[in-house]
Image (spheres, rainbow, N blue to C red):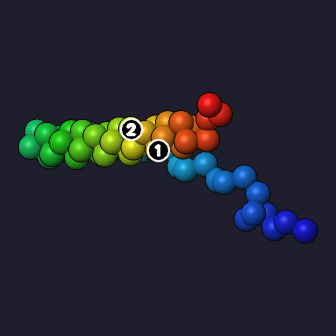
């Protein structure tokens, strides 16, 4: 019998934006830079996965 942990993967928590009240301009700029870096990292991971998927599909495609 399957355990609950073996069922569908749990959804990741939603992104919680930083409360901006009282945050300095410099801290907001740093926050934006960190978010942009994270976005770039995620896009690169997506591109790599798409590339791997395409290679696997090409490998297993019937001639």
Query: Disc number at residue 18?
Result: none
Residue 53 vs residue 31, the one in the foreground: 53
Which quarter of the figure has residue 1? bottom right
Which is nearer the eye, 13 or 45?
45
Residue 47, which numbered label?
2
Front-most of residues 20 and 15: 15
Camera-side residue of 10 and 49: 49
**Viewport quadrant of the C terminus:** top right
Which residue, as the protein is rendered here, is positioned at the far left?
26
On screen, residue 19 above or below 8: above
Q: Position of residue 46 (x, y in %)?
A: 42, 40
Left/right of residue 9 with respect to residue 23 in the rendered view: right
Q: Earlier in the sequence, mark 1 or mark 2?
A: 2
Q: Note whether residue 35 is visible.
A: no
Q: Residue at x 76, y 57 (%)?
A: 7
Q: Which residue is mark 1?
A: 52
Residue 51 seen from this side: yes
The residue that appears at 15% across and 45% down in the rendered structure is 30
């Amino acid at each position: 019998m399957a355990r609950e942990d073996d069922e569908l993967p749990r959804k990741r928590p939603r992104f919680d934006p930083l409360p901006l009240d009282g945050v300095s301009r410099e801290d907001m700029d740093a926050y934006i830079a960190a978010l942009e870096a994270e976005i770039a990292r995620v896009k690169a991971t997506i591109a790599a996965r798409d590339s791997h998927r395409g290679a696997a599909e090409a490998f297993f495609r019937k001639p």
